[in-house]
Amino acid sequence: MSAPAAGEKFQQLVDLMARLRAPGGCPWDREQNFDTIKPFLLEETYEVLNAIDARNWPELADELGDLVLQAVFFSQMAAEENLFRIEDALDAINQKLIRRHPHVFGDETAKTEGDVRKRWSEIKDEEKRKKGNSDGTLLGSVPRSLPALVEAQQIASRAAQTGFDWENAGQVIDKLHEELREFEEARTGGDREQLEDELGDMLFVLVNLARFVKVDPEQALRRTNAKFRRRFGYVEHKLAERGKTTRESSIDEMEALWQESKK
């Protein structure tokens, strides 16, 4: 007997969610609403990212299932209020993929990844203008509710598509040095608002530098966070072997163990 098709398994999930929300179902699931479920959507998203970082494929499959559940949960609540159904969400993404890939499903051509990204943004902006979700400017369609790092990436990429950009990574590094000098001036000046402005400028330039060298700044920072966790954990473990804690140790002792951890 062949394994059930993905569509059958997806329908089973939809049916399970409807049963949980129905009278006589699960009290917890029945009490949830759009706002109470939002934190779980974020949590599951980050758990997916953690599984990818760890290259733990069985865990990734499990976490992706949890993420799909969130979409089904939201859609079930929407269906109960006669707003839309999961079929509408699936139809929307299917049509969107077709619409935004005219070089695959239409008669347009795209020779490079850059061509694809440029056309995708153009089509996306046009969609938002038709829906009234944009103020008509290039950056108006970038959601202000995005995390600041993601927003900076999208703003910089959109502006670069018009030619408003540096020519190479070296120029971006020069700009970073310039912003660093301005930050130092603000730091010694004691103006907190200016200090925040200059720090923001430095972060924005770093996002652009990441774009030039084709590195995802979010992923780069996540890797550094994980590396710091490992090394600091090593320091704590070694100090514990000596019967000490970090608070009972000197900075020189901890620095020596930190350098040892890097080996």
Image (tube, rainbow, N blue to C red):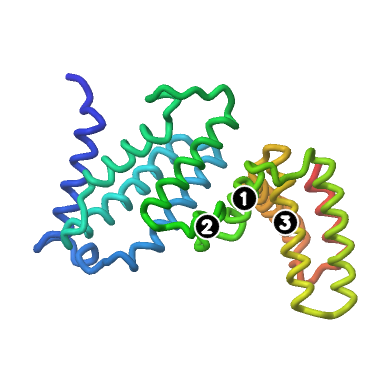
The quadrant of the picture occupied by the N terminus is top left
Give the residue type that dot 1 points to.
Answer: Gln
Sequence order check, earlier mark of 3 and 2: 2
| Residue plotted at (9% across, 63% down) | 23
- Quarter of image, res 31: bottom left
Quarter of the rendering containing residue 53: top right
Q: Is residue 222 visible?
A: no
| Tag of residue 153 | 1
Label 1 vs 2, first from the N-terminus = 2
Which quadrant would the C terminus be assigned to in this image? top right
Q: Which residue appears at 79% of the width and 72% of the height?
A: 195
Res. 249 in view: yes
The residues bearing labels 3 and 2 have C-alpha atoms spaced at a distance of 42 Å
Q: How many marks can you see?
A: 3
- Mark with earlier residue (3, 1): 1
Q: Amino acid at mark 3?
A: Phe
The residue that disc 3 covers is: 232
Q: Secondary structure at mark 1?
A: helix
Relative placement, left or right, of 149 versus 82 is right
Q: In the image shown, does 189 or 62 lie closer to the viewer?
A: 189
